[in-house]
Image (cartoon, rainbow, N blue to C red):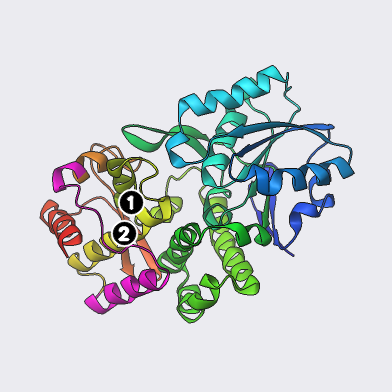
Amino acid sequence: MQKLTVGLGERSYPIHIGTGLLAKAELLTAHLPKKRVAIVTNTTVAPLYLAKLQETLHQIGVQSVEIILPDGEVYKTAETLNLIYDGLLTHRCERSTPLIALGGGVIGDMTGFAAATYLRGVPFIQIPTTLLSQVDSSVGGKTGINHPLGKNMIGAFYQPQLVLADIATLNTLPDKELSAGLAEVIKYGLIRDLPFLEWLELNMDKLLARDTDALQYAVMRSCQNKAEVVAADERESGERALLNLGHTFGHAIESGMGYGCWLHGEGVAAGTIMAADLSQRMGWISEQDVTRIRKLFQRALLPVRAPDLGVEKYLDYMGHDKKVEGGKLRFVLLKQIGQAELVSNVPSELLQQTLEASVHD
């Protein structure tokens, strides 16, 4: 097992990464002072891991309330969020009742937002069960829900008490979901960790084959990068925005196609190729660099071509992006492979060229 810390002063918290962690009650004990928790999960994860977690909690005398939600990005809504509140209120959960998010990014984001707002704030723990949530969404305290006009536009920064990433839960992950998580893993290499990107190029086949050591290393290195960025810029006023490489385009794809049609990681993959194309048009990276990036996403079995929503529709959806400032679109672009920058002065003709080229390649 490996342990990292997200350094946020009094609100610092550990990330534990390893195999079989769901059975390690001692990792949870310090964070559960009361003998009651609420576990929020979904219809896919509950049959796989809910009983195992409850058995572990039972060992330390902790009883649990279960709140089981429908599965999928399409349910990341205010209506589903209300189901969490309904469960908490029905079971008379108090301010001292921690919430445990057991599932992927949707469960983590919604449980975190419920924790931030129920009784004006209750503790919560992240137990991510997908690669994407282990390497990205469970760390850093971004919580929220989607709106028909934009992804993750309603939410709060609210940090967990603990993140428990059990690599064994990735064994039940569908291949498509594993690939989707790899999009966020590749992102860290592209924006700030060139040696990690080179490691990924050498080890992509091992990751796809679910080699436990390779997966644990990828999760650890990704969380290390994320923890460093969050500690330096918790509320995304500067460096943290760089973690959104490919996301401005990717969120437009997800919104435009309808939530759940493209997985988040698939949108990020195609969006990152678009960001690389735009970086090349800005004169920062070479055509060979773009080819190298595209090849790695292809090896991860991810889409590298965006759907043709039409240029105007892309611009409309991107106009609802959280990074828009003063009415101006801002993009995370690559100055070089391993170094990213937030850019607000992209010439509109270059953006138009990227949008047209990306969907008609």
Q: Read off the residue under disc 1.
A: 250
Q: Is residue 122 above or below residue 72?
A: above
Q: Position of residue 70 (x, y in %)?
A: 53, 35
Q: Position of residue 342 (x, y in %)?
A: 33, 54
Q: Of the residues shown, which amino acid type is indicated by label 1?
A: Gly
Q: Are marks 2 and 1 in contact (CB under 8 Å)?
A: yes
Q: Residue at x 52, y 38 (%)?
A: 143
Q: Of the residues shown, which amino acid type is indicated by label 2?
A: Ala
Asked if the magenta segment contains residue 302, the reply would be yes
Looking at the image, the residue that sits furthest to the left is 349
Q: Is residue 266 left or right of residue 234?
A: left
Q: Is residue 282 left or right of residue 136?
A: left
Q: Position of residue 80 (x, y in %)?
A: 51, 28
Q: Quadrant of the C terminus?
A: bottom left
What span is in magenta? 286-313
Looking at the image, the residue that sits furthest to the front is 47
Q: Quadrant of residue 120?
A: top right
- Label 1 residue SS: helix
Q: Residue at x 64, y 52 (%)?
A: 7
In depth, the one of 32 and 307 nearer the eye is 307
Q: Quadrant of residue 153?
A: top left
Q: Quadrant of the N terminus?
A: bottom right
Q: Residue at x 52, y 58 (%)?
A: 174
In the picture, the disc for residue 270 is 2
Looking at the image, the residue that sits furthest to the bottom is 202
